[in-house]
Each structure stands twice: as structure tokens, then as C-alpha cells.
Amino acid sequence: MVQRRGIHISHIALWIVIIIATTWGVFPFYWAIITSLKQPGVILTKPALIPWLQFQPTLYNWQLEFSSRLPEISKALRNSVIIAGGSTAIAIALGTLAGYGLARFRFQRWKNKDMTLWFLSQRFLPPMVTAIPFFLVMQSLKLLDTLIALILANATFTMPFAVLIMRDVFKELPEELEESAWVDGASRFGAFWYIALPLAAPAVAAAAVICFAFAWNEFLFALILSYRNAQPITVIIAGVEHTQGVQFWFVATRLLIAILPPALLALTAQRYIVRGLTFGAVKG
């Protein structure tokens, strides 16, 4: 009886934690949705959270955005897709090769452990530390306000994710499979390309989605390195400011528009994300 009561209490506590975590994660999206459906006067005068009961929903903000600012938003979305896609391609290409090298080779001068720690340290390094050097380098190369500058900057900071994920994935793959390919006459790169890489494809897809999401949400370098032609959607969202303050109704509208591409990508690749992130977690 005591044991059954203990299990019952633990289930209640578990459900409370799940509800709190779900509310914590869902509330920002709910706020964005209801804010985009409010009149500016309602947002500035009272904290209304329930549509039809506390305020009357309207599509006024959406209609105004699409009628007056559609070219600006479309250009920013296109820039974000190019920047995130280009930086992801570079990060995955270099990160997969680097991860394979760290998993399969033993380096002497610079130890594998030291190089892995160096890649990991890139994620702890505040981006602001490298913002000014990046600005000066891009200025000297005449790449300011270009998509290439933002692609290179984002690839620099997303590549450590790809390296660390792929290193662990390739370490989990049996090396005997590649050795069998060598016996059949394959080269080292051939064994990697035809044997190891197809087996690691789910992890590559998962790493690509993670890199794409980080590059899509990047703001600091986009603000510093672009000012007109190469501005992504994050800068356009942050630029919704008026002399009377931040126009939260337009922030919410553009926020929901900006969420769609990465959300669709994550939904499309969710099967590969789960397989990739759990790769090697259970050994047979």
C-alpha cells in the first residue's frame, strides 16, 4: 500500500514537471501568436492573454506587414536561407572530415584530446570577443555587407558542433568494416566515402539541422557585418523600433514568419535527427 502510494506521488510529481516544462517551452510561441493578433492599443494598455474573452483578435498586423513590408521581409528571408545553408554546407563538409580524422587517426604533436578540447572551447568563447577582428578582416577583404562574410562567420562558429558530433559517431562505427574495404582494394578515402559516410548519414543530417538552426538564429555578426544588402531576418526583427518604443505587434508577426523555415526543416528531418543524436547510444 505504501509502495503504491509512493508510485502514485512520483507520477503526480512527474506530470507536474512535464506540465511546467511544456508551459515554459510553449508560452513564448503563444505570446507571439496572440500578440500578432492584437491591436497596438490593446498591447500597450492591458496584459490580455485570452483571445475573444480579453481582446478581439484581428489580422491587421499581418495584413500591414504583407502589404507594406513584404519585399523587405522576403529579401531578409532569402538572405537567411543563403547564409544558413552556405555556412551549414561548409561546417558539415569540414566538420565531417575533421571528425573522421579525430576518430580514426592518432596525432602526436597535437594530441587528439587537445584538438577536441580546442574545438569545444570555440563554443564557450563569447562571439563578441571575435566580432571586431572579424569586422577588420572582412573590411580589408572588402566583404562587408555581403552574404559571403556572414557565411564564413557562421561557418566558423557552427563547425565545432559538426566536428564533435561526427567524431563521436565515427568512433562508434566498427573500424573492421573499413578494413574489409581496404582488403578489397579500396583506398582510405574510398572506405570513408563508400562505407563510413553512408552509415553516418543520419548523424550528418542531425548535425546539419543543428548547424542550420544556429546560423539561422545568429544576430551579433549579422548586425556588425551587414547594414543594407545582406541583412538576415534576425536583424529585420530587431529593427522594429519606433520613436515611441518597440512595436511588439510587428516583432511577433516577423518572429512567426521567421520560425517557419527552420521549423519545416526540423519536421522534415526529425526522423534523422533522432537517429543521428542517438547514434551509438545502444550497442548490440
Image (cartoon, rainbow, N blue to C red):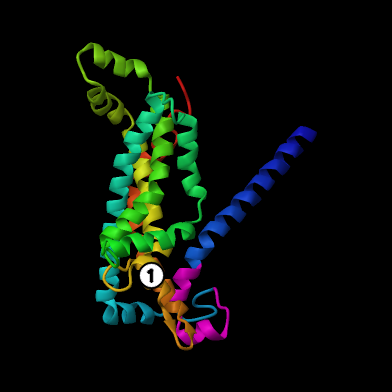
The answer, for residue 110, to whether it is visible in the render is yes
Quadrant (top left, top right, bottom left, bottom right) of the C terminus: top left
Task: Locate residue 260, reporting x and y percent.
Answer: 35, 61
Q: Give the residue drawn at x 33%, y 82%.
A: 64
In the rendered image, the vertical position of residue 74 relative to residue 278, given as above or below: below
Q: Is residue 1 visible?
A: no
Examine the image and state in which quarter residue 68 appears.
Answer: bottom left
Location of residue 191 with respect to 161 vertically, above or below = above
* Quadrant of the image occupied by residue 217: bottom left
Q: Mark 1 packing: few (<14 Cα in 10 Å), some, or many (20+)?
A: many
Measured as percent of width and height from the top left, residue 157 is found at 41, 51
- Residue 17 picture location, percent across and down: 64, 50
Q: Is residue 35 magenta?
A: yes
Residue 213 is inside the magenta segment:
no
Identify the image quadrant of residue 24. Answer: bottom right
Question: Looking at this rendering, what residue extends furthest in the left direction?
Answer: 185
